[in-house]
Amino acid sequence: MVSEPSSGASDASSTSDEEPVPAPSTSVLQTVNIRSHVLVVLDLDVSNYSQWRCSFESVLGKFGLEAHVQEPPALDLRTAEWRRADHCVVNWLHNSIAKNVFDVVYKPRASAFTVWSDIEGVFRDNAVQRSVYLETEFRSINQGDMTITQYTAKLKQLADGLRDIHMPVSEPSQVLNLLRGLNTKFRSLRASIADRNPPHTFMTARSYLLLAELQMQHDAKAEAGEALYAGTGSSSGTSDTTGQPRPKGRGKRRGRGGGAPPGGAPSTPGGGAGAGHDGQPRPPAPWGYNPWTGFVQAWPFPFRAPGAGVLGPRPPFQAQQAMTAQHLLPALPPASPRDQSTGAWDNREQASSDLVLVVEFDQLELACA
């Protein structure tokens, strides 16, 4: 049985024995839209140099143009075909970077190697100083209100920035830093991820946390649904305050006084004890309740027969009305109803009689309202 060579040996042999890919003709290169091959636009504000470089190097390798940015030939060896291809690469570089990067690296009649080197210098100069700030941000970031996807993407971006300036972060350090900044709701998962053997990589730990986050979201929705069902169930119960189930068929109310109770028992307008909806004796109505008028009055009022006029018959004299009238009347001295000498009526007696009538009329209107 023949054993297969290790991946390291195969990679080394393929690298050493690799032949350069012949570049296509410039007529083909001139039709290439670089934005359809490199989807990342290099921007100073986004710090996506590693992503952009990875995509651009892939395009250069696909067309066999790596030499234009790595080891350009001497000036006497640059043919017209090579110069046309180099101009195509320069055009690709200019069309895949943002305006803020273009303003820094722009040089007239610059070669692809020059533009490539200037772009690399913009993002990799002052590596030691930049590594201090990136390392501080990387070690102090917390999840906060970010999702696991957003949180891990931010950590990955910072780790890539450190790798671009030749300060790579190891896998175990990335995993431990990931666990350090997690929310407290993932507290129970930290020990299981950190103590795993073999240890988690950054990507496997991310997948583990994504699954846990999905389960938490599902449980939260289930608990919210149960709480809503419990709230609606308690408010829409079919039992009354005595614990007995309410009857389903209720008689419709007729008018303001309600319909006749089941069993043919007449209802008592004066507040008597009739039969209720459930067949039980109805408790007596409070004193002074008139079911025909729908309100409670302080004294009983007789029912007005039809055809008795707008105001109805004159109500009998009530003690309350007499007391009210007496309190309202001013103290008048006694006088004879008529002056014998002049034959005129006494005006004070007439005013007292009119005041009593006004008070009684107002009380009658109030009772009929």
Image (spheres, helix red, strand yellow):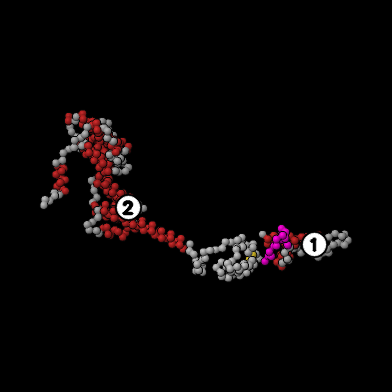
Between 181 and 139, the one lying in front of the other is: 181
Tell me residue 259's x, y (percent): 60, 63
Give the side of residue 91 with respect to residue 335, left or right.
Answer: left
Q: Do the CB atoms of the residues marked 2 and 1 lie less than 8 Å apart?
A: no
Q: Nearer the viewer, mark 2 or mark 1?
A: 2
Residue 176 visible from this viewpoint: yes
Residue 307 among magenta residues? yes
The residues bearing labels 2 and 1 have C-alpha atoms spaced at a distance of 97 Å
The label on residue 367 is: none
Magenta residues, start to end: 300-313
Residue 362 among magenta residues? no
Q: Quadrant of the C terminus?
A: bottom right
Q: Which residue has dot 2 on it?
A: 148
Residue 124 visible from this viewpoint: no
The residue positioned 30% from the left and 51% from the top of the image is 152
Tell me residue 250's x, y (percent): 54, 63
Dot 1 lies on which element?
helix
Tell me residue 218's x, y (percent): 36, 57
The residue positioned 22% from the left and 32% from the top of the image is 25
Between 76 and 283, the one lying in front of the other is: 283
Q: Amino acid at mark 1?
A: Glu
Q: Which residue has dot 1 on it?
A: 349
Location of residue 172 (image quadrant) = bottom left
Q: Check disc 2: other Cα within 10 Å, few if <14, some if 14-19, many if 20+.
A: many
Compared to 62, does 289 lie above or below? below
Location of residue 317 (image quadrant) = bottom right
Compared to 367, does 28 lie above or below? above
Question: Hey, which residue is sitting farthest left in the picture?
Answer: 1
The rendered magenta stretch, by its main secondary structure, is classed as loop
